[in-house]
Amino acid sequence: MVALVLFGIVGALFTRLMTVQGRFFDRQGMGNAARNVSRASLNRVVSDFRMIEATGGVVAATSTSLTIRIPFAIGVLCKNNVAGTATVLSLLPVDSTTYAKATENNQFYGYAWRNFSTGVYSYVEAPATEANGDAAVCTGVSITMVPNGKTVQVTPVVPALAGLGTPVFLYNKVTYEFKASTAVPGKLGLYRTVIAPSGALASEELVAPFANTAGWKFFAVNGGSVAQAAPPANLADLRGLELHLDGISENIAPGQVSNETAPFTTAVYFKNRTN
């Protein structure tokens, strides 16, 4: 009789141990899943945000939505006003797939050129076009295309004050936004939407789910080292972003009352600052 009682006690304890261990591993797994959400979004977001030009790269901003101009190719001006309509550029090497994706379905949005005297980039868009150019035009003014580079022509023409060798980059217009997820209903997802000059939208949900605290804050020229919750009135004063990529698990672990969360904060500062 005593043996049966002891066996029952040991069995109950063992069952309790297995239950606790199972819940622990479930919670660990969901915690890892929440962290993976933050990590999965980081590479894509940072690679795009680091390319933002400081004074004109941000078009619209809120704490959960950001519309930006993302450069995908950079080069120099070879000759302006070719045939009275176009400017020929010699571009540095760029991944062929990246270039093809940036220009497919008429998603090329515009170009920006740098003023030699002020260092400020001016944006030319709506409408702007991009097409293959003649490398001989660049060779004729002693600009040799870099191996694996590309010669293109853009319209409308760059203003006359831009001279030979003026830096120029081509860009897409893209919106990053946290909104209701389609992959994980009831949660937030991070979307990347490419905006074509025609207004057509090509949207994809990059990763989900995120906590309701996900978003970004803003570093401004006169804001010091502390990021602000609201963007400055003049978006040209933006100098960086504090990213809050707070992941969350899809489900609640057994024995818990809420989803596992993985707070994640990092910062990105814009390039080509003039102040």
Image (tube, rainbow, N blue to C red):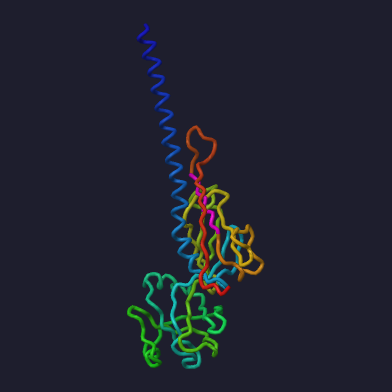
For this rendering, which residue is in front, 45 or 228?
228
Q: Residue 212 placed where, x, y %?
A: 57, 49
The segment highlighted magenta reads 242-249
Q: Is residue 215 above or below residue 101?
A: above
Q: Residue at x 32, y 80 (%)?
A: 147
Query: Is residue 157 highlighted in magenta?
Result: no
For this rendering, which residue is in front, 268 or 18?
268
Q: Is residue 182 above or below residue 66?
A: above
Name the residue furthest right: 233
Q: Is residue 158 above or below residue 226?
A: below
Q: Residue 243 placed where, x, y %?
A: 53, 57
For the N terminus, which image quadrant? top left
Q: Residue 200 placed where, x, y %?
A: 53, 69
Count of numbered circles in the view:
0
For this rendering, which residue is in front, 155 or 183?
155
Q: Residue 196 placed where, x, y %?
A: 52, 71
Q: Residue at x 47, y 87 (%)?
A: 87
Q: Residue at x 48, y 66 (%)?
A: 50
For this rendering, which residue is in front, 207 or 76?
76
